[in-house]
Image (cartoon, rainbow, N blue to C red):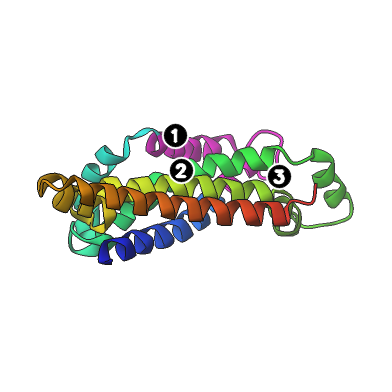
Amino acid sequence: MAATQETIYMTLLSVAATFVLGLVLGLLLFLTGKGNMWENRAVNTIIGTFVNVFRSIPFIILIVLLIPFTKLLVGTILGANAALPALIIGAAPFYARMVEIALREIDKGVIEASHSMGASNLQIIFKVLIPESLPALISGITVTAIALVSYTAMAGVIGAGGLGNFAYLEGFQGGNPFLTFVATVAILIIVFIIQFIGDYFTKKIDKR
């Protein structure tokens, strides 16, 4: 059904953007932290504050706060595309913290050994930090993707489309509990598929 396609569309695009933005923010949080390659207290504080603020705002409130920005960016506050800014801004800081935690778990000796062998900072990032933390990064984006599915449902209640909108309009307001149940089952199936894919790739990559 169209509602399922809209939910999948919103989830896929927001997960992709969240992965990229969250990875960049997480790397910056880690690298500018105390004792790391790009240690910079001011930058770390600014990024950390941004992440903490947007990670703490309840998603339904964030959607409302971003209405002027969404209208400016997308041209409307209705439909699947209008939900994307709030979905990405809401999820990326959450994932950034997971990235930072994953990077902190890397053995410092591996990084120091790479430095002693003459590796540049970029080489350490792309050939040591990301590969070493990849299982945790995939596990983290899996959790984030599942959270995004629930976010799309909340966004649907205020006109973003998808299964949340279908369950609210056709099910709740239409007085048809069966349609609400169908939408719920569809969301659960999407969540189970995401979890299965995430677990598969995490186990595939994790060589420990």
Q: Residue at x 34, y 35 (%)?
A: 57
C-beta proximity under 8 Å, tags 2 and 1: yes
Please provide percent x and percent y for residue 96.
52, 44
Instruction: Work out whether residue 171 or residue 51 is closer to the camera in this orientation and state it.
Output: 171
Write the start and end of the magenta stretch as one range.
26-55
Distance between the alpha carbons at the discs numbered 2 and 1? 7 Å
Q: Position of residue 157 (x, y in %)?
A: 20, 47
At x 56% / y 41%, what residue is drawn? 98
Mark positioned earlier in the residue sequence (2 or 1) = 1
Up/down of 68 relative to 36, above or below: below
Q: Nearer the viewer, mark 3 or mark 1?
A: 1
Give residue 170's position: percent from left, percent from top: 15, 53
- Which residue is labeled 3 in the image? 37
Specify the quadrant that holds the N terminus: bottom left
Query: Which residue does the numbered mark 1 point to in the structure image?
Result: 52
What's under tag 2, amino acid-wise? Pro
Question: What amino acid is labelled 3 in the image?
Answer: Met
- Locate residue 26, reporting x and y percent: 56, 45
Q: Main secondary structure of the magenta part?
A: helix
Look at the image and say whether residue 58 sits in the magenta stretch: no
Please report whichever mark, 2 or 3, sits nearer to the chain's N-terminal start. Answer: 3
> Pointer 2: what residue?
93
Residue at disc 1, secondary structure: helix
